[in-house]
Amino acid sequence: VTMSAVFNADVPVAVPAGGFVAKYSPSGDLLFAERWLTNGIISDADKHGNDQWVFCGSGRAGAELNGQSLDVVSTFQDGWLARLDTTGSVLWALPILSDVNAFAYRCSTGPNGDVATLGGFQGNVILENDTLAGNGSSYCNFLASYSSSGQLNWAHRLGGDDHFASFDMERAPNGDIYILGEFENELVLPGMSPLTASTPLDMFVARVDPATGLCRSAYHYGKVGSFYVQSYGSVWPTANGLYVADCYDSTFTMGTHVLEPSGPVATDIFIAKFDS
């Protein structure tokens, strides 16, 4: 990111990896831009009300958010979750630790101020006083919920022993948590019986109870094509339905709808709407 600054030095200036926050007016004018994070990455942010923000990301040992240590210890990366006010003051910040590797890449607040975060890990992941076991050296996903004051409500590992990846998470107006992702063979989510894939790589969208973290309903749909054709699709829960968008590169079936790509090597995008 380039901002209005010039470094005058005889040798290159080394700046640790970090993250910044910028605010723009409704017309697109830059109001301010400040570096808030050192030795880490900001992956996602969500605003709660008019005076608080929630951020999540990853960091290495020594990572700080506006001068406050994130208490991450890994020389590779650990995850973190934090709530700040709009002046940048840290209200609370929590590490998401692992014995190998951990990161948080989605966060969203509910109507009562609770915070859900979605992330990945290798080995075991440690969230406050709860430890989730992984699947050897394979990447696993977790979903966790914290109270408005930063206390862990619950945490669950997502997926089984086969390939599983979650790409997006959003909250519905009533607080329900929606997750979008992909899986091989069986879809394994807490609180539901496994669903069997209909193609080598199926996509799914799931609705999760914010009070328990258990799956209330899930829908999967075929995605025949390249293993990594997906564009890390998006899910948008609204008051009048659920919208899903992703991409496909071969015959794609969702319910009674069959879509063909626009060409033999094309990767196309679809958008679909579900009822509530």
Image (spheres, rainbow, N blue to C red):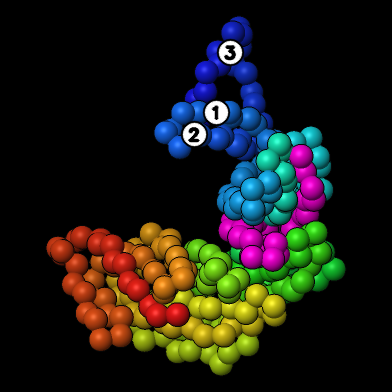
Q: Residue at x 68, y 58 (%)?
A: 102
Q: Element at badge 3?
A: loop
Q: Which circle's residue, 1 or 2, is located before the other in the chain? A: 2
Tell me if label 1 and label 2 are in contact, CB under 8 Å: yes
- The secondary structure that most of the magenta stretch takes on is strand
- Quarter holding residue 143: bottom right
Q: Which residue is mark 2?
A: 25
Residue 104 lies within the magenta run: yes
Image-based side of 253 in relation to 44, left or right: left
- Is residue 264 on the magenta stretch? no
Foreground disc of the pair 3, 1: 1
* Label annotation for residue 7: 3
Q: Residue furthest bottom?
A: 193
Q: Residue furthest left?
A: 263
Q: Report crowding for label 1: few under 14, some 14 to 19, many 20 or more residues within 10 A (C-alpha).
A: few
Callout 2: 10 Å neighbours few (<14), some, many (20+)? few
Left or right, 7 with reference to 227: right
Q: Please report whichever mark, 2 or 3, sits nearer to the chain's N-terminal start.
A: 3
Which residue was labeled with disc 1?
Answer: 31
Residue farthest to the right? Answer: 129
Residue sitting nearer the eye, 86 or 127:
86
Which percent across, then down, holds residue 131? 78, 71
- Which residue is at a point 50% across and 28% down the rendered structure image? 30
Q: Which residues are magenta?
A: 89-115
Tag 1: amino acid: Leu
Vertical position of residue 153 compared to residue 72: above or below:
below
In this view, the residue in front, 263 or 3, is 3
If the image is split into quadrants, where does the C terminus sit? bottom left
- Three-letter amino acid code at the position of disc 3: Phe
Distance between mark 3 and mark 1 Cα atoms: 22 Å
Q: Are marks 3 and 1 in contact (CB under 8 Å)?
A: no
Amino acid type assigned to the residue bearing label 2 in the image: Ser
